[in-house]
Amino acid sequence: MSETGAGSATGAGTGPARALRVLVLNGPNLDLLGTREPTIYGRETLDEINAGIAARAVELGVAVAFFQSNHEGALIDRLHRRDFDAAIVNAAGLTHTSVSLRDALLAVERPFVEVHLSDPATREPFRRINFLEDVAVARFVGLHARGYTLALEELARRWAAGLILARAGDVEAPHG
């Protein structure tokens, strides 16, 4: 599992007093991007995709943190930290199987945008099951890396319009 961050300050203007904090959460096997089935997922690595998101975040005045894990529990634990205002989520194969990840996304009460590099609806029938689509505020599928940038822009637009609450003071959820 890996976590990185890229911070930025808000620019002058009439927007919120601090930068929107976005968690970019990537699920299983996305660490293999660039080499994993490039005809489906493209040749860009996850690091390259994250670099593009980070660059756009600076332009938008958004603070981003990145987290990828091949382990469902690690993704859920990361969400439970609640140190973000909104998220971009590519749950990968967990999209089709994980009620627990769905429950965690609902429990932390943060809006999220669902992203998929390919369009699961055009692939194998089992990929048409989606436990996240009805609770996501927006979805970008089949647009490869561009979907992440569009998701970030959508969250920034919602933040500027006051549709996302600043979640200052939230702390990690208690364990037990």
Image (cartoon, grey):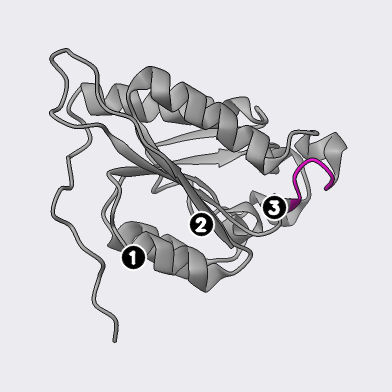
Q: Amino acid at mark 2?
A: Phe
Q: Amino acid at mark 1?
A: His
Residue 131, numbered label: 2
Q: Position of residue 71 (x, y in %)?
A: 59, 69
Question: Which stretch appears magenta?
Answer: 32-36
The CA span between labels 1 and 3 is: 22 Å
Q: Is residue 115 above or below residue 109?
A: above
Q: Quadrant of the N terminus?
A: bottom right
Residue 31, numbered label: 3
The CA span between labels 3 and 2 is: 22 Å
Q: Position of residue 63 (x, y in %)?
A: 35, 35
Q: Amino acid at mark 3?
A: Asp
| Left or right: 109 as drawn, with respect to 169 | right
The answer to whether mark 1 and mark 3 are in CB contact below 8 A is: no
Residue farthest top in this picture: 13
The CA span between labels 1 and 2 is: 19 Å
Q: Which residue is mark 1?
A: 80
Please, what is the dominant secondary structure of the magenta stretch? loop
Q: Quadrant of the C terminus?
A: bottom left
- Report the mark closest to the observer, 1 or 3: 3
